[in-house]
Image (spheres, coloured by chain):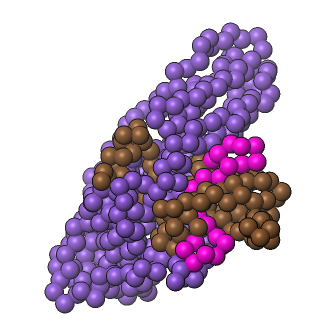
């Protein structure tokens, strides 16, 4: 077992400020088994304490399910290069992160792949 | 993305002490966090509008980057936010270089040349990407000679645009007095944490959130603005506490100068906030802060915490906050989209 600082130092990221604290803990999401969910953006809530993307996702049975994708607060999103129009309704995006342990269609996303393929921290 | 868990033991204890619920220890960050940290930085845009001007006219530089570790524009601008625009009026033809650092040793640059009619180019090759030095690295002074603390500062672990906050991983050295065990906060596995309510943090927990904060200094008062939750404090210099202050979330503060150090004394807290280390407190909480701007870029700070109902003795937290040269002010923060997470924890 190595410490996070040692791990990040090996990656050359020791100087990178990754938020240690958040508005709330992440215990409600399964961060150790990330999933990727692809959907069509319905709306993007550019808000604190968290921005949210709501997207239509087709489940295994072919039914449309609305997923809510929780992102970091605006301060952090701005530091990653987000703006309030980075995603638009109708965009097809893929969100990678931890889904709710309850099985509800909601997740905390670490990475979002935008409609043109570029990936950005979320 | 969040790293509320994986850390060396001292950070884990600090996080669990702050009331966060640490997940089971693991040997590395969650896979999605680890991959997010390695996403390459990109320049999406770097333009000058217009690209040709007459002497004395202005232009607007506009830029957008993604996944940066740091962003600089040379010459003469220095550290900037990942997206932004700046209006300038160069006196001669200038090539501006946008330098973006990404994870590991990644560096990407892009240039744009602004032609000023009838002038000779001031720089024929792009700059090396180092920050333009400030006019002076000395502590700025007010007209009355006192240090001017005005500026936007980094806080906690949020390092973008400024240096790391020194002291942020120091363990909390607080000792409860006998019989005061009830003041230690214990959180259950489905408790979303101290910040989930979006209520003011009190002092000094306001410095423990990853959001910048700002000092605006006048001659007779100093105002501190915390971006997180839009909190503020007004500190009259040589003021006096009311005899019986109404208990408030951020307390009643007065300040005085001790040489080049601003000493801020705060009482009159309600008992609704938490202290670093996951302690509650009583209305007898007394916080003494000392602010010393040692040079242009660095603000040394310490806070001594006393509560005779809770702690065996006063204890002190020390930090060095770096200046955020990329920011003019804090942004708005309104907790307008808070959620109740209790149903997401699962069976």
Side of B346 relative to B243 (left or right): right
Q: Is residue B195 magenta?
A: no
Depth check, front residue: B16 or B323? B16
Give the percent coordinates (x, y) of residue B77. 58, 32
Q: Is residue B251 visible?
A: no
Q: How many marks?
A: 0
Give the percent coordinates (x, y) of residue B35. 52, 47
Rendered residue at 77%/70% (across/down): A61
Residue at the extreme front: A61
Side of B29 relative to A111 (left or right): left
Side of B260 relative to B41 (left or right): left
Give the percent coordinates (x, y) of residue B152. 49, 51
Chain coloured purple here: B
Depth check, front residue: A96 or A77? A96
Rendered residue at 51%/21% (across/down): B128
Rendered residue at 32%/71% (across/down): B17
Rendered residue at 82%/58% (across/down): A89
Q: Colour of chain A?
A: brown
Residue B172 drawn above or below residue B189: above
Q: Is residue B342 visible?
A: yes
Q: Is residue A105 magenta?
A: yes
Q: What's the magenta region?
A: A100-120
């Amino acid at each position: 077992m190595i410490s996070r600082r040692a791990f990040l130092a090996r990656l050359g990221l020791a100087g990178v400020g990754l938020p240690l604290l958040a508005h709330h803990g992440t215990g409600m999401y399964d961060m150790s088994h990330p999933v990727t969910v692809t959907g069509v953006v319905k709306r993007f809530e550019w808000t604190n304490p968290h921005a949210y993307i709501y997207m239509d996702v087709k489940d295994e049975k072919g039914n449309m399910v609305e997923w809510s994708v929780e992102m970091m607060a605006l301060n952090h999103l701005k530091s990653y290069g987000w703006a309030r129009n980075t995603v638009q309704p109708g965009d097809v995006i893929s969100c990678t992160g931890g889904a709710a342990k309850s099985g509800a269609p909601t997740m905390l996303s670490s990475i979002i792949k935008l409609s043109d393929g570029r990936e950005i921290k979320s | 993305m969040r790293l509320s868990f994986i850390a060396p033991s001292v950070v884990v204890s600090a996080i669990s002490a702050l009331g966060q619920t640490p997940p089971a220890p693991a040997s590395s960050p969650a896979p999605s966090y680890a991959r997010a940290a390695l996403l390459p930085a990109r320049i999406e845009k770097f333009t000058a509008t217009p690209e040709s001007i007459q002497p004395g006219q202005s232009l607007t530089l506009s830029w957008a980057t993604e996944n940066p570790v740091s962003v600089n524009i040379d010459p003469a601008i220095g550290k900037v936010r990942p997206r932004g625009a700046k209006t300038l009026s160069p006196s001669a033809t200038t090539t501006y270089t946008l330098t973006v650092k990404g994870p590991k040793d990644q560096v990407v640059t892009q240039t744009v040349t602004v032609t000023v009619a009838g002038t000779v180019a001031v720089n024929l090759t792009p700059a090396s990407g180092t920050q333009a030095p400030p006019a002076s690295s000395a502590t700025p002074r007010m007209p009355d000679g006192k240090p001017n603390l005005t500026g936007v500062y980094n806080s906690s672990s949020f390092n973008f645009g400024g240096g790391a906050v020194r002291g942020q991983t120091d363990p909390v050295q607080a000792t409860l007095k006998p019989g005061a065990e009830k003041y230690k906060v214990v959180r259950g596995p489905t408790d979303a944490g101290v910040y989930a309510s979006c209520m003011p943090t009190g002092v000094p927990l306001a410095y423990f959130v990853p959001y910048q904060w700002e000092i605006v200094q006048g001659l007779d008062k100093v105002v501190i603005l915390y971006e997180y939750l839009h909190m503020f404090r007004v500190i009259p210099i040589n003021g006096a506490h009311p005899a019986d202050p109404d208990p408030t979330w951020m307390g009643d503060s007065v300040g005085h100068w001790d040489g080049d150090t601003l000493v801020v004394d705060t009482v009159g807290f309600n008992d609704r906030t938490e202290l670093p280390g996951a302690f509650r407190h009583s209305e007898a909480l007394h916080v003494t802060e000392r602010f010393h701007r040692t040079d242009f870029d660095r603000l040394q700070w310490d806070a001594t915490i006393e509560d005779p109902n809770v702690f065996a003795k006063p204890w002190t937290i020390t930090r060095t906050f770096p200046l955020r040269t990329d920011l003019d002010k804090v942004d708005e923060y309104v907790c307008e989209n808070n959620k109740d997470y209790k149903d997401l924890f699962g069976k």
